[in-house]
């Protein structure tokens, strides 16, 4: 996080800098819509990025798996800014989506970790997230840095629109607090390890979140699947009542992302529904949740940045669950460092 921030924002909100973004203020103002494309973790980081762009810049934005996009003969719109996201910069579905877009005349930026990679070369500009090498196959710190890069991009777009200087400063100050707050979470690893042992007997796990919390739930469930091989489902909390509640029983614990935002009461209602069905609940929240069997308490920051801090303990949960089950976390089965077919 520190490396993404260093040198790219200075103390005044008016001078957010984004390296080789190649999108000046006039071009940024002309953007009517943002479409983010990635696979797996990068798709999930894109969902959080889209939320940041919508809330800070008020530009409609969404994220889609690049594989779906490239196969559906997409309509390419000249007023849309396309952004390809990839840790490795080599994932074939993302590269193919970029090539398809460029064939149709679109301008595509990249949010990429590996410098000089195929996607970085193919895109018209963008941001390197400087997460360093992902030593294991599974993308973790790159996820965090990608979301930070999107926060900066959202500020950049917002600055050319109605984002107030006060809100811009608020987010930048929030970003600056992240490194210390992330260290605080990492210091509580023992507690998360204990919880991982407690839940490692689950055959299946449910992950829920709402709005900003939903992509965190998706990503946390993916991490668990990838390295522990426990089946996991992720749902927007309100979708539970449209079918998945039928799955809730003691053998299927729920991990709930419950930030202290304006949706807290709605989230608590979902926890009650789960408890009424004897479901075990592990909450990630800003304070103890009464309905939860366990709560991992994370530090408060600006609500827009909640996905960053709430994702980290769940990465650790997946990691310690995998270790508890004796999995090879560095070489998970059926997962390539970059998926090139
Ligand atoms: C995309 C991805 C990763 C996942 C695994 C397989 O990679 O789905 O999210 O953890 O490595 O590939 P990338 O395009 O972000 O490199």
Image (spheres, helix red, strand yellow):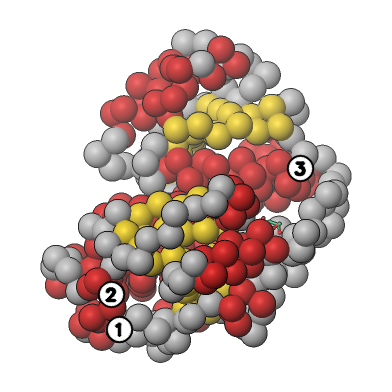
Where ligand 1 lies, by quadrant?
Answer: bottom right
> x and y percent of residue 148 in the render?
43, 67
Picture quadrant of residue 38: bottom right
Question: Tag on residue 114?
Answer: none
Asked if residue 272 is positioned above or below residue 265 in the image, the reply reads: above
Q: Nearer the viewer, residue 96 or 169?
A: 96
> Which of pointers 3 and 1 indicates the residue nearer the eye?
1
Are the two marked residues, 1 and 2, in contact with CB atoms closer than 8 angstroms? yes
Q: CA distance from mark 2 to mark 3?
A: 42 Å
Decide if ligand 1 comes within 8 Å of the CB at mark 3: no
Q: Which mark is residue 28?
A: 2
Residue of label 1: 24
Tell me: 286 left or right of 68: left
Q: Which residue is mark 3?
A: 228
**Relative image position of residue 29 (x, y in whole percent):** 22, 73
Which is more N-terminal, label 3 or label 2? 2
Asked if the residues shown at circle 3 and circle 1 are in contact, with their CB atoms under 8 angstroms apart, the answer is no
Which corner quadrant of the image does residue 299 belong to?
bottom left
What's the CA distance linking mark 1 and mark 2? Answer: 6 Å
Residue 331 seen from this side = yes
Closer to the N terminus: mark 3 or mark 1?
Answer: 1
Q: How many marks?
A: 3
Relative to residue 8, is residue 87 depicted above or below? above
Q: Secondary structure at mark 1?
A: loop
């Amino acid at each position: 996080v520190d490396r993404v921030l260093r040198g790219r924002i200075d103390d005044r909100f008016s001078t957010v800098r984004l390296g080789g973004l190649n999108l000046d203020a006039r071009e940024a103002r002309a953007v009517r819509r943002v479409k983010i494309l990635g696979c797996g973790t990068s798709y999930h980081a894109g969902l959080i990025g889209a939320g940041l762009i919508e809330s800070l810049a008020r530009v409609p934005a969404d994220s889609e798996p690049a594989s779906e996009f490239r196969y559906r003969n997409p309509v390419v719109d000249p007023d849309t800014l396309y952004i390809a996201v990839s840790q490795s910069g080599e994932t074939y579905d993302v590269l193919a989506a970029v090539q398809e877009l460029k064939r149709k005349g679109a301008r595509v930026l990249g949010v990429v970790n590996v410098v000089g990679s195929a996607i970085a070369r193919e895109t018209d500009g963008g941001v390197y997230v400087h997460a360093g090498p992902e030593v294991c196959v599974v993308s973790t710190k790159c996820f965090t840095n990608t979301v930070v890069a999107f926060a900066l991009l959202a500020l950049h777009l917002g600055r050319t629109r109605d984002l107030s200087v006060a809100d811009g400063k608020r987010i930048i100050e929030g970003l600056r607090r992240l490194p210390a707050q992330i260290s605080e979470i990492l210091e509580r690893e023992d507690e998360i390890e204990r919880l991982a042992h407690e839940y490692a007997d689950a055959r299946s796990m449910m992950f829920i979140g709402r709005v900003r919390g939903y992509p965190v739930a998706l990503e946390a469930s993916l991490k668990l699947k990838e390295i522990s091989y426990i089946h996991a489902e992720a749902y927007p909390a309100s979708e539970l009542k449209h079918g998945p509640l039928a799955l809730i029983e003691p053998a299927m614990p729920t991990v709930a992302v419950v930030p202290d935002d304006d949706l807290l009461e709605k989230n608590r209602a979902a926890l009650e529904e789960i408890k009424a069905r004897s479901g075990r609940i592990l909450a990630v929240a800003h304070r103890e949740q009464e309905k939860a069997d366990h709560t991992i308490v994370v530090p408060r920051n600006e609500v827009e940045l909640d996905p960053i801090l709430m994702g980290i303990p769940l990465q650790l949960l997946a990691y310690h669950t995998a270790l508890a089950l004796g999995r090879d976390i560095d070489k998970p089965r059926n997962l390539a460092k970059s998926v090139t077919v």
